[in-house]
Image (cartoon, rainbow, N blue to C red):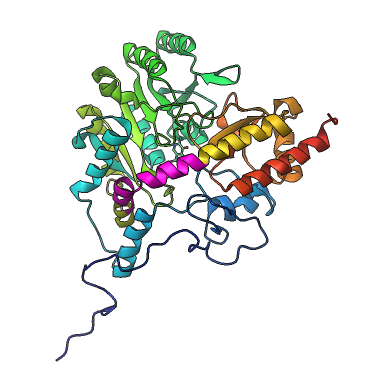
Amino acid sequence: MTDDPVPGAGRISGGGPAGDDPVPGAGRISGGGPAGDGPEPGGPEPGGPGIGRRGTLSVKWDAAGRIFGTPGVLPLWVADMDFASPPAVIEALRARLDHGVMGYSFAPESFVGAFVRWLETRHGWTVSPEWVVFSPKVMFSVSSAVSAFTEPGDRIVVQPPVYPPLISSVERNGREVLYNTLRREEGRYRMDLDRLAAGLDRAADEGRPARLLILCSPHNPVGRVWTPEELRGLGRICLDRGVLILSDEIHFDLVFPESRHTPIASLDPELAAGSVVLASPSKTFNIPGIWSSFAVIPDEEHREAFRRRLEEQGMSRPSLMGILATEAAYRGGAAWLDETLGYLRGNRDFLADFLSGELPEITTRAPEGTYLVWLDFGSLGMDDAGLKDFLVRKAGLGLNPGELFGPGGSGFARLNLGCSRSLLRRALEQLRDAVRDVTPRR
Ligand SMILES: Cc1ncc(COP(=O)(O)O)c(C=O)c1O
């Protein structure tokens, strides 16, 4: 009797050298079909020319028509980049695809080890591997932390304008949002620490103290990279009042050379014990579609409460592709990241020059970190509905409306620089022409 042939046998190699395939690289990746009549990124951006994303199930490109009500907008919204991920990531995934079996998998020690090493070499932060808890997504961690560390009805501080899900996650968990709106001084945003202290004291006097503060660091959408002094000031206020800091540091690697990111828990042992840091390879290496993230929780009690919450929800283990992509990115993606940061910085400076030279009606402060730009349209005198309509219908742009970012967001829109320079130029030209149509000639 002969054994049944194993399905796929002959195509599966038994784990031999995986690297026979050529490395996917510049110019070889196509977006999965014809690019249609829409604009495509082009030029010498990271990832190479000719990457099209239409028809690839891209939220940014393929859902733009549905979201903005018209298919033709240039999509500069959702926070991912139009660039291929680091070759090391693609090689690692390709090797597994060539093997062909996508079975249950486990994360080796080297998985967390690669992340810990990255924190050490890139951020100068020494972290014990046991402090690190895997979570599939940063927003899953935020929601889990809210439910693990607070009770229904509790107050949680958020500092808008801020990434909208940080606000909705509090509300969806049945907690109350306590806003500490950022202050804008000569275009630069700061945390209003005096108002924070007063607000926390007032909440305590009312018998309903805040238990958690959600920090966004670097801050999406205003692009601030908080300084150690600012973080120490915030930390002191929270520690003195028993408020745990949940620090969403997903953009922590996307910082331009004039600034330096400081993980809040790296500042001193007291702050380490009083904070939970959320980080991820997703923004850094442009792999948000492959779910993988980490929480760094030095305090054992907090860590176990968080881990329990993840386990209760059955989401405490990484996926096979998440394991492979994450480790490959942290071990082999540094040069790609440096190149990408250089390109993003070029985009940032191009935008600043364009606005000051050709579009002074719209102002911004160049981001210190993140590839997001927070544009002030106040001088156009439009209400939010009018601005949204103007951007979509007159300028043909898909940007994130500022009003969604909570208090302080009205009159603004967020633009994503993670695109080719040629696409950015075209978007800015369309915006300039639309503004000229609605403002008196200069
Ligand atoms: C500040 C911030 N937190 C979290 C996320 C989402 O992270 P994840 O996809 O891991 O849930 C984003 C995505 O834009 C973000 O900007």
**Residue 141 position by quadrant:** top left
Magenta highlight range: 325-343
Q: Residue at x 60, y 17 (%)?
A: 186
Q: Residue at x 39, y 35 (%)?
A: 142
The front one of 157 and 286 is: 286
Most extreme residue toward the front is: 44
User: Which secondary structure is most common in the magenta stretch?
Assistant: helix
Give the left or right position of residue 35, taking residue 160 as reference.
Answer: right
Rendered position, 42 above or below 364: below
Most extreme residue toward the left is: 1
Q: x and y percent of residue 120 in the render?
A: 26, 34
Ligand 1 placement by image quarter: top left
Q: x and y percent of residue 52 in the render?
A: 56, 58
Q: Give yes or no for residue 44 being in the magenta stretch.
A: no
**Residue 254 position by quadrant:** top left
Can residue 245 be seen?
yes
